[in-house]
Image: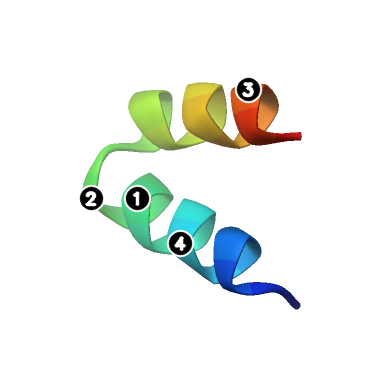
């Protein structure tokens, strides 16, 4: 797992919708 992945998960826990979008854009 990279820091980006952990960050995405953290964001996902705070805001699921934004977390998913952020993870999609990050990839």
Q: How far apart are marks 1 and 4 (CA)?
A: 6 Å
Residue found 36% across the figure and 26% down from its top? 18
Contact (Cβ within 8 Å) of mark 3 with mark 2:
no
Q: Distance between the residues labelled 2 and 1?
A: 5 Å
Please, is residue 9 above or below residue 11 in the view?
Answer: below
Disc marking residue 3: none
Provide the residue designation for mark 3: 25
Badge nearest the viewer, 3 or 2: 3
Provide the residue designation for mark 1: 11
Provide the residue designation for mark 4: 7
Contact (Cβ within 8 Å) of mark 1 with mark 4:
yes
Please, is residue 21 above or below residue 16 in the view?
Answer: above
Q: Say which label, 1 or 3, has the lower sequence index.
A: 1
- Residue 21 placement, left or right of 18: right
Residue closest to the eye, 16 or 2: 2
Determine the secondary structure under disc 2.
Answer: helix
Please, is residue 6 above or below residue 11 in the view?
Answer: below
* Residue 6 in the image, given as x and y percentages of width and height: 54, 70
Residue found 76% across the figure and 34% down from its top? 27
Provide the residue designation for mark 2: 14
Residue closest to the eye, 20 or 5: 5
Image-quadrant location for residue 4: bottom right
Contact (Cβ within 8 Å) of mark 2 with mark 4:
no
Badge nearest the viewer, 2 or 4: 4
Residue found 70% across the figure and 73% down from its top? 2
């Amino acid at each position: 797992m990279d820091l980006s992945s952990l960050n995405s998960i953290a964001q996902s826990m705070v805001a699921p919708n934004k977390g998913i979008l952020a993870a999609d854009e990050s990839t």
